[in-house]
Amino acid sequence: MQKRSIVPIIYILFLLLPIYWLVTMSFKTTNEILGGFSLFPQTFTLENYRVIFTDPTWYWGYINSISYVTLNMVISIAVALPAAYAFSRYRFLGDKQLFFWLLTNRMAPAAVFALPFFQLYSAVGLFDTYLAVALAHCLFNVPLSVWILEGFMASVPKELDETAYVDGYSFPRFFVTIFLPSIKAGVGVAAFFCFMFSWVELLLAKTLTAVAAKPIAAIMTKTASSAGYELGLLAAAGTLTIIPGAIVIYFVRNYIAKGFAMGRV
């Protein structure tokens, strides 16, 4: 083995260590976790996963999270596509200032908007719904999607649009059948980042839900009891939260690589 390959291997192992430790803890009892240090479970158990898959409170947490995350991805990409096209193809009064304003929304901390969203959604009857969380996350994901997609669209020659119009394409037909496939890598990258932010965001998701749409991250706090934390159950829940993200990364991995090469990532 060459010396230069040792450092990357050590670095990768260092990154994988917390994941390995989390997975290992998920197969242990809380008493064993607190009892001492061990690389492998001394008493292997699936009880933690059984609780998650049989308790409606737990598995509905995953369903709720996936539901509003998916809804947010659809809304964010649907809104960002025409906006990014306008920024990449047209010049209008205040376009740069508007583009910068969109990005400032992404820079603001989520805590700033928690109370306004809570009062607004309570007043209009959206509190504790998937749509409430999805729309709240759009405040951050739409600007990010516009920024990423505009970079991809700007790399597509304007002559493509003109040629399609000369050939008799209407704008909707051109956009869906010609333009959109040419930036599918950008759509994949934008969808990935929308998913990741919405999946891991907790403050807004916890503030805007109570029971019906409560996310898994908020439900994980219920592992605390008078006897302490149920660490094995918490580890099992944490392990399962990694899986959706890993699946998304698997399907968009090629687009992400291309996004780092072409787009604004």
Image (spheres, rainbow, N blue to C red):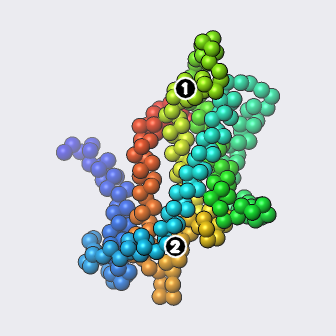
Q: Where is residue 11 in the image (x, y as percent from the top left)?
A: 34, 52
Residue at 51% over, 28% down: 181
Q: Where is residue 93 in the image (x, y as percent from the top left)?
A: 80, 28
- Give the residue type that dot 1 points to: Thr
The residue tagged with tag 1: helix, strand or loop?
helix
Identify the mark nearer the N-term, 1 or 2.
Answer: 2
* Position above or below: 92 against 244: above
Residue 107: mark: none
Q: How many labels does the image show?
A: 2
Residue 234, quarter of picture? bottom left
Residue at 53% over, 77% down: 222
Label 2 CA crowd tier, 10 Å (few <14, some 14–19, many 20+): some
Residue 163, quarter of picture? top right
Query: Position of 48 compared to 70: left or right?
Result: left
* Position above or below: 89 against 203: above
Q: Look at the image and tell me in which quarter the N terminus lies.
A: top left
- Identify the residue position indicated by label 1 in the image: 177
Query: Position of 243 compared to 158: left or right?
Result: left
Q: Position of residue 131 (x, y in %)?
A: 65, 56
Q: Which residue lies furthest to the left in this view?
A: 1
Residue 167, quarter of picture? top right
Disc 1 to disc 2, how far (Cα)? 43 Å
Label 1 CA crowd tier, 10 Å (few <14, some 14–19, many 20+): few
Q: Which residue lies furthest to the top in this view?
A: 166
The residue tagged with tag 2: helix, strand or loop?
helix
Of residues 222 and 147, the one drawn nearer to the viewer in this rendering: 222
- Give the residue type that dot 2 points to: Thr
Residue 57: mark: 2
Query: Position of 44 compared to 243: left or right?
Result: left
Res 219 seen here:
yes
Res 158 seen here:
no
Residue at 59% over, 34% down: 149
